[in-house]
Amino acid sequence: MRQRTMPLMILLAAVLALSAGAALASTNAEVEAAIKAALVDKLGSDAETIRVAFFDGKATLSGQVTEDWTQELAKEVALYVAGVNKVENQIEAKNERSVGSGKMHYETQDAALETDIKSALRAELGDHASAVEVENCDGMVSLRGTLPDQARHDLALAAATKVKGVKKVVDLLRNPA
């Protein structure tokens, strides 16, 4: 009797392993689809060309986009998707700023605008502003983090939008359930 149950147990273990692997592949595909949808939703049609691979909490983004801000903010958007812990950004931008075109000047301007936005957030949110990460590229700003309620969420978006130099705010803020 024991000789018969051993092969049966091995077969059962193999079936369970295969079904778990299929479920993992399905879950990975679902997260990839969620990342892709979030990229297009938050960044617009320029993000449609981004390819996404996801495995074990890590998303890899690749492809070519037109704008450098799409390239830079794509990582922030991917981190917004549940299950994503790390992002490798391999996206290339056709209109990427280069050193010869004043890239350092633009990077300095981007950092200054981020500082202005963080100041505006502190003025509106007080201590809650520390929960908000700000990323800016050429006036395209993402706000990512968790705020305690919808009222502060709305205040953060309004405060960032009012800062001179902000062209668009990409809302990646969450409120606890």
Image (tube, helix red, strand yellow):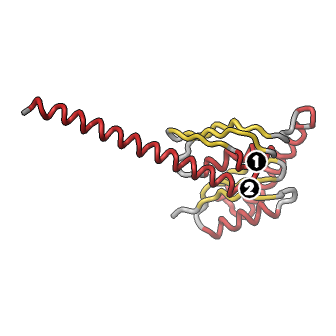
The tag on residue 44 is 2
In the image, farthest residue toward the right? 101
Q: Could you tell whether 23 is left or right of 72 in the image?
A: left
Q: Secondary structure at mark 2?
A: loop
Classify 164 as above or below 72: below
| Nearer to me, 164 or 66 | 66
Mark 1 vs mark 2: in front: 2
Q: Nearer the viewer, residue 164 or 140?
A: 140
Residue 146 drawn at (x, y percent): 60, 57
Q: Determine the secondary structure under disc 1.
A: helix
Q: Residue at x 71, y 46 (%)?
A: 49
Q: Is residue 59 left or right of residue 25?
A: right
Q: Quadrant of residue 89?
A: top right
Q: Give the image location of residue 72, x and y in percent.
A: 74, 43
Q: Which residue is mark 1?
A: 70
Given contact means CB atoms under 8 Å apart, are the residues at marks 1 and 2 in contact?
yes
Looking at the figure, which quarter contains the N terminus?
Answer: top left
Label 2 is placed on what type of residue?
Gly
Counting other residues with Cα less than 10 Å from the Cα at mark 1, is it few (<14), some (14-19), or many (20 or more)? many
